[in-house]
Image: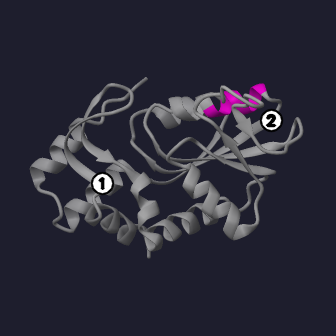
């Protein structure tokens, strides 16, 4: 499956939707990518994991860590398939036991590669990098499936992170329009809703 086929599969399985949506940032959007559902479609899930792994070639890291919750499944799939150590960052610290927010066996100064599904403002990624760095770990590289073209990538790069994206939302819109999956109006409304966050 190539990138265009993946985009069409995501759309056909309702992981890319058009209509009236509100993003985590509070911004309205006419296009919404809900990639978490990929775990229910093994072929799509494996394709995304394989694409991530190919994008990771040449990067140096001791662990991978998926941004919770949506990228955890991809990180787990890649870790299992390629025998890569993984760390798990919780949304919030446990209220019992060790009360950790970061799970895994690691040492200070080890390097972690971050994985994410969709980037808008980069806020969820920065929550994760903040916890990792507070625990003495080093983050240099971030890989994600889709850039929403709303400024998050620029924010991350300006903070010194090396960012690698598999695709961007404008390409997604173009592929769906070219293949007659969405109308001219859908394309216009989707592109017009991509307001920069910075």
Q: Quadrant of residue 82?
A: bottom right
State the mark number for residue 16.
Answer: 1
Residue 164: percent from left, percent from top:
58, 50
Tell whether 189 sits left or right of 16.
left
Q: Dot 1: few (<14), some (14–19), or many (≥20) neighbours within 10 Å?
A: many
Residue in the picture at 58% in, 60% down: 52
133 is within the stretch colored magenta:
yes
Q: Quadrant of residue 96?
A: top right
Tell whether 18 sits left or right of 167.
left
Q: Is 22 placed above or below 73 here? A: above
Q: Quadrant of residue 188?
A: top left
Disc 1 to disc 2, how far (Cα)?
34 Å
Tell whether 196 sits left or right of 107.
left
Question: Image quadrant for the C terminus?
Answer: top left
Frontmost residue, 196 versus 32: 32
Looking at the image, is mark 1 or mark 2 earlier in the sequence?
Answer: 1
Which span of residues is magenta-colored? Answer: 128-134
Q: Which residue is mark 2?
A: 137
Tell whether 178 sits left or right of 82.
left
Residue in the picture at 75% in, 44% down: 112
Q: Dot 2: few (<14), some (14–19), or many (≥20) neighbours within 10 Å?
A: some
Q: Is 122 placed above or below 174 here? A: above
Question: Image quadrant for the N terminus?
Answer: bottom left
Frontmost residue, 145 versus 75: 75
């Amino acid at each position: 499956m190539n990138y265009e086929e993946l985009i069409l599969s995501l759309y056909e399985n309702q992981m890319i939707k058009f209509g009236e949506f509100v993003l985590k940032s509070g911004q309205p959007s006419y296009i919404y990518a809900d990639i978490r559902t990929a775990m229910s479609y093994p072929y799509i899930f494996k394709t995304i994991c394989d694409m991530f792994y190919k994008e990771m070639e040449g990067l140096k890291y001791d662990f991978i860590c998926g941004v919770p919750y949506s990228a955890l499944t991809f990180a787990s799939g890649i870790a299992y398939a390629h025998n890569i150590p993984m760390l798990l960052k919780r949304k919030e610290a446990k209220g019992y036991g060790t009360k950790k927010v970061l799970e895994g066996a690691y040492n200070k100064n080890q390097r972690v590669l971050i994985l994410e599904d969709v980037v808008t403002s980069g806020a969820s990624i920065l929550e994760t990098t903040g916890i990792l760095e507070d625990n003495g770990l080093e983050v240099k590289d971030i890989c994600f499936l889709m850039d929403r073209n709303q400024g998050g990538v620029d924010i991350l790069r300006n903070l010194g992170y090396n960012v690698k994206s598999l695709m961007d939302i404008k390409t997604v819109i173009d592929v769906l329009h070219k293949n007659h999956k969405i109308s001219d109006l859908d394309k216009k409304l989707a592109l017009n809703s991509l307001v920069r966050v910075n």
